[in-house]
Amino acid sequence: MDPIREAMLHRSRAAKIERRGKLISLFCITLIVVVVVAIFTFVASRGLATFFTDGVNLWSFLSKTTWAPAVKDAHGAAQVGALPMIVGSFGVTLLSAVVATPFAVGAAIFMTEISPTLGKKVLQPVIELLVGIPSVVYGFIGLSVVVPFIRHVFGGTGFGILAGTFVLFVMILPTVTSMTVDALKAVPRHYREASLALGGTRWQTISRVVVRAAMPGILTGIVFGMARAFGEALAVQMVIGNAALLPHNLISPAATLTSVLTSGIGNTVMGSLENNALWSLALLLLLMSLAFNLLIRWIGKKGEMK
Amino acid sequence: MSNPVITSRDVHLFYGKFEALLGIDLDFNRNEITALIGPSGCGKSTYLRTLNRMNDLIPGVTITGDIRLDGQDIYAPSQDVVALRKQVGMVFQQPNPFPFSIYDNVCYGLRLAGVKDRATLDSAVETSLKQAAIWDEVKDKLHKSALSLSGGQQQRVCIARVLAVQPSVILMDEPTSALDPISSTQIENMLLELRERYTIILVTHNMHQASRISDRTAFFLQGRLVEVDATKRIFLNPAQKETEDYISGRFG
């Protein structure tokens, strides 16, 4: 057989290495998929047990306001109303996003459009530093500064949604800012040139072209921030007051899904209703983060089509 | 030469310490197409961008000399750059429509100027798109994204976007070099019609394009203006040896 033909019939060294690489990556991705599926299955099986094994009505779980899984009411039904936590979680998430967005977008515009050198040398490192601070530090500052401040100004205990919002605002600000910076930087230079060449002022160019073109990226940043706020446990638990009551104002003690989970999960017996009810909360959290993820993808896709 | 729209005298431009333009004297006549030709890096695009002060955006650029639009020194401290750019429109090499609808693209300049009246905007969009010879192709999809158009259509929308502001001069920086021959021809034919109403300054690498559509041609080489004359003369009987060498393809 001639040598060329022979070479064609055998795998080359490069092809072997390529195959090995593919196998390794396939193994890694399979592992990740298995872990994710396992987590979902576990949380779902525990979380759904509340409804199937313990016979709690799904609607009353979502709409009742009394959270006392260990206590039965007059009819002998378990009191697992998660509405206070759902309201608490959405409250702090939405409020912190609403407060953080203008600051984040403003800071990002300053860093990319108005003073890129100052932005790169000073603000970017500061933002990155903020991301790296552990959440317990934020919680501690919230506990020792924000809560007394709110108590002083508005009265009450100082614990509540307002304190949680403030702490989360500081925590998600860097996330939203840096993602907005990336979105603004990704706007091609020629859009800016075209706008300026048509007689646009700098501000008109920023507000009408750059921000508009970067909008899908900015929205993605905001949703990422919300996902982070929704899932944050420790810092919020330290300042929100941990009372599973429907909050009637922003400074009354409240609770979030995460704060009830972190404070309760270690004190219940696996398989009991108390424990299962907490898993139901965890399942709700998981579904919400899934929803946030889908929202991000949907925004991304819509941005592409433009 | 009678009544030039733009006059420039002894224009020097430095990128930091590097001198990219070494004293350009060049005038542009009203309602004429002037082609700027020359090899890459000869300074013709740089010169073009001094005329609407787009070089101001690049840090480290210094410009000396005297450039006047209708007798007004455009580098005078009192010059409003925004107003200047409304008078001197620019079309870029790469079609660069905004990621908005065709309608919003064409309206952009007018809306910047504060025009809100729907009827005014509608008629400006129609007129500009007709002038840019693309109305028939897009009239049924004005509210679709301009990015969904082909490259040649995008470039004509960009031209319409400039026309809507009603500038007196239009600068074009190799407007057809990213397009296929058919789109290029469409744009060339359109330019010949636009000449009636606008002064057009066109940078081009395409010698045939310069000879087909321009009234006058200026030949740049290494930051100098070698020669400027009626296009016929430049192509048939140039005064300078360098011009002849370039046009006959001996270098560049």
Image (tube, coloured by chain):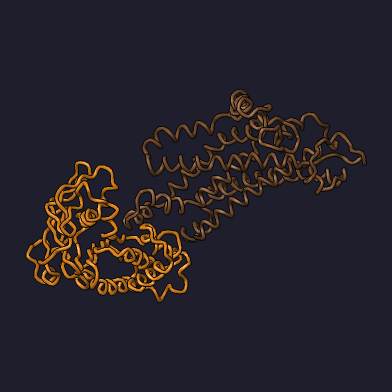
Chain colours: A brown, B orange
Residue situated in front as seen by the camera: B44 or A153: A153
The C terminus of chain B appears in which quarter of the rendering?
bottom left
Q: Residue at x 68, y 44 (%)?
A: A36
Q: Residue furthest bottom?
A: B136
In the rendering, at what x and y percent does residue B123 appear? 39, 71
Is residue A213 toward the left or the right of residue B112 in the image?
A: right
Q: Specify whether residue A35 is in view.
A: yes
Is residue A82 toward the left or the right of residue B143 in the image?
A: right
In the rendering, at what x and y percent does residue A31 appear? 66, 44
* Residue B183 drawn above or below residue B83: below
Residue situated in front as seen by the camera: B209 or B191: B191
Residue situated in front as seen by the camera: B163 or B247: B163
In the rendering, at what x and y percent does residue A168 appear? 60, 35
Q: Residue at x 39, y 63 (%)?
A: B107
Q: Specify whether residue B204 is in view.
A: no
The N terminus of chain B appears in which quarter of the rendering?
bottom left
Q: Residue furthest left?
A: B239
* Residue A283 drawn above or below residue B249: above
In the rendering, at what x and y percent does residue A249 appear? 68, 37
Q: Residue at x 59, y 32 (%)?
A: A167
Is residue A246 toward the left or the right of residue A302 in the image?
A: right
